[in-house]
Amino acid sequence: MGKKHENIAQLLPWFVNDSLGRKEQALVLSHLAGCPDCQQERDRLQDLQALIVDGSMVLPDYRFSFRKLMARIEAAELNKESTADHGFGKKRSWLPGFGLAASVSIIAGIVAFVPISSDQNKFQTLSTVTATQGMSHRFSLTFAQPISAQTMRQALIDTNSYLVSGPDSSGAYIVDIAVPDQMTDDEFIHSIKTIDGVEDAAFVGP
Amino acid sequence: MTSIQELKSTRGAEDEENLKLLQLVAVKDKVAFEKLYTRFYPQLSRYLNRLLRRPEMMEEVVNDTLFVVWEKADRFQGRSKVSTWVTGIAYLKGIKALDKLRTVPDQQADSIDEEIEESVNLISKLGLQEWLTCGLDMISADQRSVVELTYFFGYSYQEIAETMGCPVNTVKTRMFHARRRLAKLLPQLQEHKGADSSEKGTRKNGVGESLE
Ligand SMILES: [Zn+2]
């Protein structure tokens, strides 16, 4: 007993979780056969493990968290690009088309919060809210005038939406945008299509 | 019980898939990153929830962790499993977040012993999961990390040392202290066992299942 008992007792948690190497496992097994104290401790640790494994946890939808992270990544990438393009300390000049891309993203942010409403004031007061709730869906967007990927990305950051790919040869972008539970995809697409300069918007997938 | 070989081959296949995804993430493939995110989100949430004991901080630290994965994927050397590497980042980010809050560090954890004595009576009236929550609140973040990585994630003590960036003896010592503290509450577990077993049968495994 003594030192050996202590050393073996220290290994019991990893005996219980089946992660010991063969040698150590054999050592523990042979000690266990003759040590009631360690047998009792092993039983307790098995109960503890069962309890820990059993502890269920309700997870929030990963997509909302993922969108937040992608917005952060887009912002970091944009920051890198703009430092490289314009040099440190220089102000960025907005490309034409930014206003249009931004209005898509702002509308997306607003309609993601409230169902389409005739109350214009409600839209204005909510326009500063940036986080969006709801299921993220994938859409393709095309514009009458070409818009650069950088502009698109910058505009999407504010609504936790993000650019998946684009523009393709026809100028179309694939973006992930949150659609509120109260709205159907069709209603959402309709609201995007009503923006001046948006040529087409279509649902691509969940 | 599942055989060790079976368990290890499942884990091996999972890590191979993680490695493929990580290589794509290294060249900034966002679709691969979303897949990797989906794979790690449940286990990182679970681990950080236990480590931090603050659900409101969990999402932010999960994202801090996966942000580093996105940024540093090209630097992964393949010396450890992808899951060990990612969990190690989560551990560092979690400890950093706790430091900001100035919660009870390792050294002060001894002073909690008296608090444990007082809580034993209260805890005896609680359900098993509440008992566990109270018990885990009374050990340090480093000890909780060792407990969770051992019992829930099934890590070996060598893997835990790698994840937490410390010697294996430190892992064993942290587990020793955690067990000593939890042991004061363990008799309650035995008492609860009979009464709780019927309820336990109907309970779903939650995150545990999604990790299998
Ligand atoms: Zn013994």
Image (tube, rainbow, N blue to C red):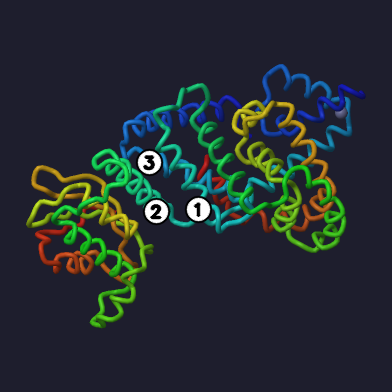
Residue B59: assigned label: 1
Place of residue B176 in the rendered image (x, y in percent of width and height, measured from the top left): 79, 36
Mark nearer the N terminus (3 vs 1): 3
Distance between the alpha carbons at the discs numbered 2 and 1: 10 Å
Determine which quarter of the picture holds residue A123. bottom left
Q: Amino acid at mark 1?
A: Glu
SS at badge 1: helix
Q: Which residue is mark 3?
A: B35
Say few, some or many: other residues with alpha carbon within 10 Å of mark 2 (under 14 / 14 to 19 / 20 or more): many
Q: Is residue B66 left or right of residue B179?
A: left
Label 2 residue SS = helix
Quick check: B81 above or below A190? Answer: above
Residue B188, given in percent of the width and then of the height, sits at: 82, 53
* Residue A25 visible in the displayed image: yes
* Type of the residue with mark 3: Lys
Density class for disc 1 (Cα within 10 Å; few <14, some 14-19, many ≥20) is many
Q: Are marks 2 and 1 in contact (CB under 8 Å)?
A: yes
Looking at the image, residue A78 sits to the left or right of residue B186; the answer is left
Q: Residue at x 14, y 69 (%)?
A: A194
The residue at which mark 2 appears reads as A68
Q: Please state which amino acid type lies under the numbered disc 2.
A: Lys
- Image quadrant holding the N terminus of chain B, namely top right
Q: Is residue A79 above or below residue A182?
A: above
